[in-house]
Structure formats: C-alpha cells, structure tokens
Amino acid sequence: MARGVVRFNPFAELDAWEKKLFEGGFPTGWRGVKMPVTDVYTQGENQLMVEAHLPGFAADDVDVSIDEGALVIQAERHEKTEDTKKDYVMRESTSSYYRRIGLPEEASQDEITADFSEGVLKVVVPFKELPEPRKIAVTKGESAPPAQIETS
C-alpha cells in the first residue's frame, strides 16, 4: 500500500522554474525576445568605452545625455504602417531602450563623444587626471594637561 503514495513536494514547481531560468534561459514567455547588448569597458587607463548594440534604430532615434554624474542612453522607435488590403487599417509598433551608467569621478564630462554607425552606438568617455592628494602638515601646539576625572 505504501507503493501508491506520492510524496508532496511544495518546492517542486520552484525547482522547475529555477531549471528553466538558469539552464534553459528565460521562461517561455521571454523566448525569442532579443535584449540589446551593452558593453562597458575601459580602454587603457585613459578612457571608458560604452557600446550599445541597437539594431533597427536610426541615429535620430538615439539620445545620449549626462544626468547627475551618469551617462544616460535612450532610444525609441515608432513604426506605423497602413495596409488597406488587410482587415486592419493601421499597424503600430514601438521599440525602446534605456541604460543609465554611473560615471567614475575622473570622467571628463565635457569631452564625451558619441558615434552611431551600423546599429552600434559608441560612446567615448575620456578620463582627466585627478589632482594628487595634498599633504597637510601637522604642527605641535601647546596643549592643556588632561582634565582630572573625579572618582567616588
């Protein structure tokens, strides 16, 4: 009689989701959706490079700005097609992209350049030299004797 008993595992579904997420990619609702690739790396010691792969976007769709010490890249594309041969009159689609990348202290924000070519946005963030830490001399002054602590 014990052979027909099925043990209940409350975590079985969670285990299945974990396997789908880490072994087989995202759950089925996300399959086929391509997320734009963004590469952030340093080139030498004098600049930061950001490459955003934005296929299907045009240069006019892309906006690059600096906001509170962060590089902000936004892209938005709207497509509108009219087709009178089908039952619908208008077909619309929208694609968008957003990245906010914190810039290091040595980033020279006034010299940042951006170039968009063949679906790839390349942003170059040059570094400026930071001033060396300044040593402050410590002088020996006249000090008062330590205060006496009363004990009872």
Image: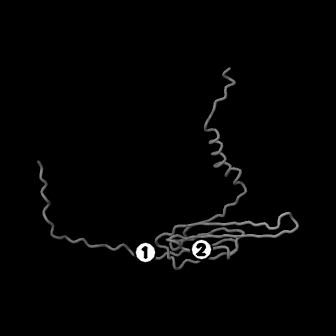
Q: Residue 92 occupies which quadrant of the picture? A: bottom right
Classify mark 1: residues with Cα within 10 Å, few (<14), some (14-19) or many (20+): few
Q: Estimate the x, y position of residue 118 in percent, counting from the top left.
A: 70, 73
Instruction: Name, please, the residue furthest toward the right.
Output: 85
Q: Which residue is nearer to you in this view: 30 or 45?
A: 30
Q: Are marks 1 and 2 in contact (CB under 8 Å)?
A: no
Residue 66, given in percent of the width and then of the height, sits at 54, 73
Task: Say whether disc 1 or disc 2 marks the residue closer to the N-terminus.
Answer: 2
- Eye-nearest disc, 1 or 2: 2
Q: Determine the residue positioned at 45% across, 76% down.
A: 129
The location of residue 7, given as percent across then percent down, is: 64, 30
Q: Secondary structure at mark 1?
A: loop
**Residue 64 bears which disc, if any?**
2
Q: What's the residue type where badge 2 is placed?
A: Val
Is residue 63 toward the left or the right of residue 33 in the image? left
Quarter containing the N terminus: top right
Q: In the rendered view, tell whether residue 33 sits above or below residue 140.
A: above
Q: Quadrant of residue 30?
A: bottom right
Image coordinates for residue 13, horizontal then vertical, percent: 65, 40
- Front in this rendered view, residue 4 or 107: 4
Cα separation, mark 1 vs mark 2, equals: 25 Å
Q: Is residue 65 shown left or right of residue 57? A: left
Which residue is under mark 1?
Answer: 130
Q: Residues within 10 Å of mark 2 (few under 14, many from 20)?
A: some
Which label is found at residue 150? none
Q: Residue at the location (59% across, 70% down)?
A: 50
